[in-house]
Image (tube, rainbow, N blue to C red):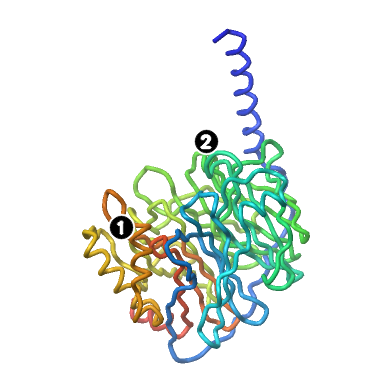
Amino acid sequence: MSCGLMQNRFLVYCFILVCFGFGFYKISEHRIPQVFQARPAIAAGANEPLFQSRFASSAQHIQTHASSLIELKDGRIRAFWFAGSREGAKDVEIRSTVFDPASGQWGAEQTVATCEDTQQSLLRYVSKLGNPVVGRAADGVLWLYYVTVSMGGWAGSSITAMTSTDDGATWSQARRLITSPFLNISTLVKGAPFFYADGTMGLPVYHEFISKFGELLHLDKAGKILDKQRLTAGGSSALQPVVLVKNSNDALVLMRYSGKDAPHRALSITTSDAGQHWTSPVKSALPNPDAALSALVLPDGKIMAALNHQEQGRDALSLAVSADGGNNWKNIYQLEDQHNQTPDEANYLKVVEALAKSTDAKTASAPAEYVESAKRQKCLDHGCSFEFSYPYLIQAQSGEIHLVYTWNRSFIKHVRFNQAWLDQQLKEAK
């Protein structure tokens, strides 16, 4: 190779690094003064404890992952996730279905976005998509954000958005958010949006090319980015921030920890001036095995989290509650628990069959397809394993809490419970 060619390549590499350096920099050094939107009033709900589980997704023998939820105007619940032959495959789609609380049933799956129709809208090649997250703007329009990649892995992601004026029955063409002035890559979304008092939206995002850190996008009512704020410094190993608004000025952010240093704990930061300034990240009391978590602020001020409450593995999932703003946590309910179980294939399939039967009455008499789907995803050359991951929590206006999460990479599981059931668990956990 000639010296001239080597020099030219060196200059290109330097240019790319400089571009990314600028991309890491905050769009604005001066925060736009804001206060957080007050949480809407939540109904007290029924006095009798309610706890139900079922599968939200129905497609079999495919990989299914990364779900999110939104309450519709009529009180139904719409879920989103991505599904395909495998994560990152060209055939992966964003899918959706609607839950009717009155009947207790999920509707048929719908395809919301594919690589092909997304690239037609964006006029650029799209090789993979994932991580759909939905929010409702002040004008009632639904905004669906999802991750798209044109080249490379997830570190080369950008965020694509679509809107719906009919609660998800139809969607606009996709458009790409410009989150960095250079190259516009390595911005991903997972956490739920939140709102400011003026109706603008905060969207938690994260960066994972070269360095991993959390960020916050501030979007106006039309979806245009007003500001981008770094939540944690580069090298903090902080991913997938979840913003928990306590009142007009105070908020807590919990983040997945992807670092190697023990103890493995979720990271946390706080603000007391509506996000003008954030504290430096510290390791919280919540164990975190480099996995996504979800949380919400309850009407009485307690914080509830759904997470893999352990330092290694995604084979158990718990509900935990903090009564002191996130300083201390109590594990109140074990949603799934196959921690450290390494059964052979025959025993694995027996356990999966039992789990499927206990999840949903519809599968009790015909669990075979659920078992075979889990076997396809989680029984590989090195053996079988369990996975319960990527939880997502919301509280409906009725007071009921809805949780969805990945079940053995095969289905999206839905858990529904009310305040009376939660109070019962809190009492028993004392």
Question: In this rendering, is residue 170 above or below 377?
Answer: below
Percent of width and height locating residue 422: 43, 80
Farthest bottom residue? 47
- Three-letter amino acid code at the position of disc 2: Ile
Q: Quadrant of the N terminus?
A: top right
| The furthest residue to the top | 3
- Residue 165 % position (x, y): 74, 70
- Residue at left offset 22%, top offset 65%: 347
Residue at horizontal 58 percent and vertical 60 percent from the top = 94
* SS under mark 1: loop
- Is 424 above or below relative to 55? below
Residue 4 image point, x, y percent: 62, 9
Residue 210 tag number: 2
Image quarter of residue 354: bottom left
Q: Earlier in the sequence, mark 2 or mark 1?
A: 2
Q: Which residue is mark 1?
A: 385
